[in-house]
Each structure stands twice: as structure tokens, then as C-alpha cells.
Amino acid sequence: MHRAQHSLRFDLIPKLELHLHLEGSIPPAIILELINKYDHTLAKTLTIESLTKIFQFNDFTHFLELWAWKNTFIRETDDFTLIANSVAKHLRSQNIHYAEIFYSPADFAKTGIPLQDMTEAIYRGYSKVDGIKIQLIADLVRGSDPKQTYSMLDPLLELQHEGVIGIGLGGNEAKFPPGVYKATFQRARDMGLLTTVHAGEGAGPASIWEALRELHPHRIGHGVRAVEDPLLMTHLAEHQIPLEVCPLSNICTDIYSDYAQHPVRRIFDSGIPISINTDDPAMFQNSMAEEYAGLMDIHRFSALEIQQLTLTAVEHSFADEATKSALRTSIIQDPQWTSHFIA
């Protein structure tokens, strides 16, 4: 997507991700392995190249449909271990030092895998990969039964030793408003779980206002359509509410027509704290290096501004202070910044 100019050099620097879905990050070879496991006939008709063509979306609704189709080939506990291990290895190969990864227990309720078993399987997979720290955010998924999401909180709190740090709310924001999950988010905060809500992606500023009013999240996932409401932009800047911005994702799902139309520069210049993320890199065929290259090539971000974005992500991550301190040091002192960008 922006490989020709700066992304090769951005491969070299330490990075982190705060908005990354486990099920949307599965390398294509692993998706094919899972399809072959459960539908050998279908697998015979597919290659990595043809699978890549399948994951080309007409719009956000089409993306959600393909997301659900892909998940039908994740059915057993061992599948989650395989996925988590492969995702962690892929992230580490890109010099991602820290990642907060969404996983969606509600999407797999029909498999009968208990929440604890699923989470432990994911932990087994990623914990075997050295050189990257991963923490988990349980995506409760809009449209799920509010009573079911509420009942998940106690088990999630007990799974903190498996890397669980909080809850999120993804899914179709235009169809499912967030207010029905108000009690779940209030109790989660009371329990010490951290919170983030997808809003301002598939729906406009009113969706962000409603998420803030009803759920009071620590961060907003996406949030880019805040630019349609000047009062909301002022509110986000004044209250320093972080947005998890995913530019190439928004283009792939046709929220914006191309990278030049994306409002990331305007949001950054407004003083709203933002992080840059890939969202579903296996489905969108993007990487953090390509995200940063797009900022530099298209939106004229300087190297120092991109370093600032990375440090902002550290500050608004859900990591403990010791982890944040180590990440700051690795980012500021990494020689690749000096040799390839800042000098």
C-alpha cells in the first residue's frame, strides 16, 4: 500500500498496536489450514492468492459478512492456540514490541468453548513467543445479549493472569446502540477492568457522543467521524479522550475513498490524542509500517511526529507503568530513528 517509499524503513523501528483484532490478524496460510481442517473440499479450491481476493470488501457491511464467514472455521480450543501463536510471531517479525489484542468470545458462543478455556488457549499460543508483550481485551460485540455480557465480567476478572486487561465493544454500531451495555461497562470499571468502545466508524458523530455518554470508555476505537462535528472535536481535545485510529482499515471498508481523504491529519492537528493501528491486518493486507508510510507520504507527517504518535500510544495504552517506561526507552533510544529518519 505504501511499500515503495518509507515502509521498509518503518519495519525497523519499535512499534505497538492498541487496536488489533485477533480473528482479523490470522495469517492467510493459517486460515487455509483451518479451512482444510473443517472443509477439505472447499480448501482444495483455494490458494493464498484466491483467499486474498475473497477479502476485498465492497463496504463495511460486506466486511462484517466476511468476518463472520471466516469465523466459522474456528471451532476448537486448539484453533485459538494456533491462531494466537501465529499472530504473535507475525507481529514480532514486524518489530511490534507491545500489542493489545481484541478477541471475541461472544462470536464463538455457539462452539460451546467456555470463556476460560478460550482465553487460556489464546494465552498458551502467544506466551510462547519471546520479544513481544501481549495483553487481551474481550470484545463483547454489539448485538450480544446484555445479560450474557454482564455475566462474563467475573470470569474475565479472574483471567487477568492470562493477560486480560479490559473489555471492548465492536460490531455494527449503526444497528446496535451502546446503551444496553451501560450496566456492563459501569461494573467493569468498578472492577478495575479498562474499557474501549468502537464508535464513529460505521456511524457518525452521534454514535461517539452516545458511547461517551452511556459507557464512559477510557478510549474510543476509530472515532474518525468526529470530524463531522466541531463540538465533538473540541470535547475530545479538551478532555484528552484517545482515539484508536486505523486509516487503511477505514479505506478498505469504504468509510473514506482513499488515503488522501482520511482525516487523520486533521484529528492529529486538533490536539486529540491518537494512536495508529492496523485493526484487521490479515483481512486488509496492511501493516504498521505501511500505516506510518502513508502518514509520511500522503499526509506529510514528519518522522518526529510519527515518533510522537508512537509515544502517545504508549501513554494511552493499558500497560502498567513499568511496561510503559520500557516502551518509551525502546522508542526514544532506538538507533533506527536516528540513522533512518531523524538525522
Image (tube, helix red, strand yellow):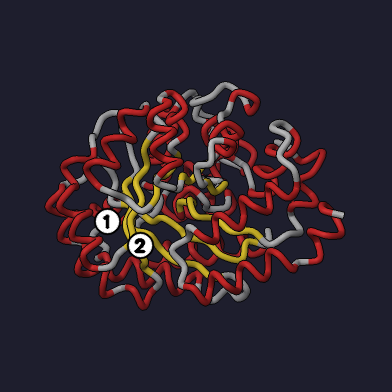
Across and down, in percent, residue 343 comes to 87, 55
Cβ–Cβ below 8 Å for labels 2 and 1? yes
Across and down, in percent, residue 319 comes to 47, 68
Residue to which mark 1 is pinned: 111
Q: Quadrant of residue 129?
A: bottom right
Taking 35 as reference, is 149 left or right?
Answer: left
- Secondary structure at badge 1 equals helix
Closer to the camera in the image, 167 or 186: 186
Across and down, in percent, residue 297 comes to 75, 35
Could you tell me the amino acid type at mark 2? Glu
Closer to the camera in the image, 120 or 202: 202
Closer to the camera in the image, 100 or 206: 206
Q: Which residue is at 61% across, 60% downward?
A: 91
Taking 110 as reference, is 205 left or right?
Answer: right
Q: CA distance from mark 2 to mark 1?
A: 7 Å
Could you tell me the amino acid type at mark 1? Thr
Q: Is residue 151 above or below residue 258?
A: below
Residue to which mark 2 is pinned: 76
- Secondary structure at badge 2 equals loop
Query: Residue 14 shows which numbered tag?
Result: none
Taking 213 as reference, is 7 left or right?
Answer: right
